[in-house]
Image: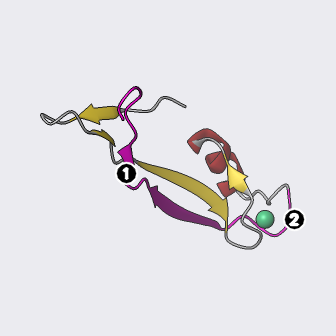
Amino acid sequence: MAEDILTMDDGSQWHQVTTSQVIVCAFCDNIVDTEEEAQSYANGGTCPSCSNSWTEKRSVTIGVAAPTPIAGQT
Ligand SMILES: [Zn+2]
């Protein structure tokens, strides 16, 4: 996974805040990788993991900005 690093004027480096949305089964938290896959389950399908009729739950994960040590600095 690519990581975006922001470099400030003072030379400090920060991870850029990123958000990503994941689609998971509401019953067993089985993670669906793609929107297309979720759609195929939504059309009367069942969760391949727990066999309940598909009920999706979306959660957004938010990356937290954090300073990154600068190589070579003492
Ligand atoms: Zn499930």
The image quadrant where one finds the C terminus is top left
User: Is the residue at mark 2 in contact range of ligand 1, meaning its CB lies under 8 Å from it?
Assistant: yes
Q: On the rendering, which quadrant does ligand 1 occupy?
A: bottom right
Q: Looking at the picture, tell me which residue is in the foreground, 45 or 31.
A: 31
Magenta portion: prevailing SS class: loop
Frontmost residue, 4 versus 52 = 4
Badge 2 local density, few (<14 within 10 Å), some, or many (20+)?
Answer: few
Question: For this view, does 42 lie left or right of residue 5?
Answer: right
Tell me the residue at 12%/34% (across/down): 9
**What are the residue bounds of the magenta stretch?**
49-74
The residue where tag 2 is placed is 51
* Residue 9 vs residue 61, the one in the foreground: 9
Residue in view at x 61 percent, y 40 percent: 36
What is the count of numbered marks?
Answer: 2
Q: Mark 1 highlights which residue?
A: 66
Name the residue located 76 percent from the left edge and 56 percent from the top edge.
45
Residue 57 covered by magenta stretch: yes
